[in-house]
Amino acid sequence: MASQGMHSPVEQFEIKSIIELSAGGYDISFTNSSLFMLLAMVVGGVFLASAMSKREMVPGRMQGAAEMMYEFVADMVRSNVGNDGRAYFPFVFTLFVFLLFGNMLGLIPYSYTFTSQIIVTFAMAAFVFVGVTIVGLVKHGLHFFTL
């Protein structure tokens, strides 16, 4: 009697193609990792949009959660970068919401956590590192390396 589902605990970390695509000899397939990244963006966006659609002076649960997320990231940016960091807040908040909802979706049994692949985490970290370095060089020149 064969059972459906996973046979090994490690199977949940495998990347599986959903839609096979190829361009110029490169595999650009839509995978379960891509699906859950897209799902994390959609769920995060829908949550924030619905939580803040009917704003009230005394917030409900969803509005309170959205405001707490906002304040948490705003305080973190303010304490690390100062008031000049307000320009970078939208990027940091978007990254926070993306990772938060991606990891929360991974808590659902038999779902996929895209941050379980080290290349995903490395790519996001490298993108932020290169971006911060470029912004630092533009704003401070070579003096950036002595800060």
Image (cartoon, rainbow, N blue to C red):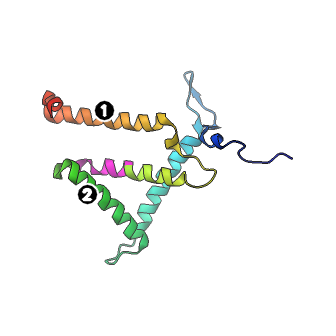
Q: Check if residue 94 falls in the magenta segment.
A: yes
Residue at image point 37% right, 37% down: 125
Query: SS at mark 1?
Result: helix
Query: SS at mark 2?
Result: helix
Reply above or below: 49 against 129: below
Looking at the image, residue 45 sits to the left or right of residue 106; the answer is left
Pair 2/1: label in front? 2
Question: Label 2 vs label 1: CA separation?
Answer: 23 Å
Q: Residue furthest top?
A: 25
Residue at image point 32% right, 48% down: 92
Looking at the image, residue 56 sits to the left or right of residue 43; the answer is left
Q: Check if residue 105 falls in the magenta segment.
A: no
Please give the range of residues in magenta: 87-95
Residue at image point 60% right, 32% down: 21
Picture coordinates of residue 56, whole percent (x, y): 34, 76
Is residue 31 in view?
A: yes
Please state which amino acid type lies under the numbered disc 1: Val
Give the label on residue 130, or none.
1
Tell me which numbered mark, 2 or 1, is placed earlier along the sequence.
2
Reply above or below: 63 against 147: below
Q: Residue furthest right?
A: 1
Q: How many marks?
A: 2
Picture coordinates of residue 93, whole percent (x, y): 34, 52
Picture coordinates of residue 80, whole percent (x, y): 22, 49
Please state which amino acid type lies under the numbered disc 2: Asp
Q: Residue furthest front?
A: 9
Reply above or below: 135 against 99: above
What residue did someone put label 2 on? 75
